[in-house]
Amino acid sequence: MRGMLSPSVMCADLLNLADEIKKLDELNVEYLHIDFMDNKFVPNITFDTNMVKSFKKPMKNIKRDIHLMAFEPMQYFDRMEIGEGDMVSVHFEACENVNSVLADIKARGAKPCLAISPDTPVESVFDYLDEVYAVLLMTVYPGFAGQPMAPKSMERLEKLKKIITDSGKNVLIEVDGHVSWDHCSEMREKGADIFVAGSSSVYGNDYPLDKAVEKFYNLVK
């Protein structure tokens, strides 16, 4: 199976998002990465819940990859209309009861995922591998685009892959943060399955979108 792509809408052409989503659909991109921030868990905000919901309208085949950087994220699920086909990541560090949040996502027909920040030990996910579709490994500190990769991110990715493999569970790994042309192939080799691509690759200025997507898929075969 080839690596899957989840371009970060935060880095897209915000004035032409419907056209942008249509292009990604036509290019058979699997996911659209949508960051939601509460200005508490991270000191920033992006799209509100109505915007997160509205992304569903222009989508045909592409699915929402919703990343909630927010404390007690369940309070937002109804307003986002979380449901069938969505992939939804919540932070281990931001949930009082991780199991109940993951169960709520699954009950809505979505794919529950657990995100961990760079300072959180990768072993923290072990007890939840039965409950998740994927682990979202942050390779930058959550909250801002354009950061350099956090130290030891590649080692953490390799270690996470070993934990999952040794567990015998069928859990994917998503990487988010400075997923650049220079890093994505190594990330794939070390176990990444889904790539959140932004300003350091797909939404850089080096290529038009179709050529950038083609190049990315060639690098993460």
Image: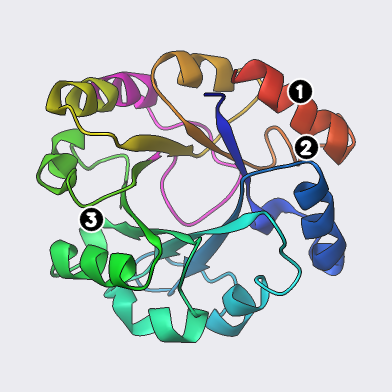
Q: Residue at x 59, y 84 (%)?
A: 50
Taking the image as drawn, is residue 183 in sight? no
Residue farthest along the left direction in this orientation: 127
Rounded to the nearest whole Å, what is the CA distance between mark 1 and mark 3? 33 Å
- Dot 3: few (<14), some (14–19), or many (≥20) neighbours within 10 Å? many
- Dot 1: few (<14), some (14–19), or many (≥20) neighbours within 10 Å? some
Amino acid type of the residue that numbered disc 1 sits on in the rendered structure: Lys
Q: Disc 3 designates what residue?
A: 92
Q: Disc 2 designates what residue?
A: 204
* Nearest to viewer (mark 1 / mark 3): 1
Q: Is residue 158 magenta?
A: yes
Is residue 202 left or right of 65 when viewed as pictured?
A: right
Image position of 20 with respect to 125: above or below = below
Q: Residue at x 43, y 75 (%)?
A: 38
Rounded to the nearest whole Å, what is the CA distance between mark 2 and mark 3? 30 Å
The part of the chain drawn in magenta is 137-159
Q: Circle 2 — which element?
A: loop
Rounded to the nearest whole Å, what is the CA distance between mark 2 and mark 1? 12 Å
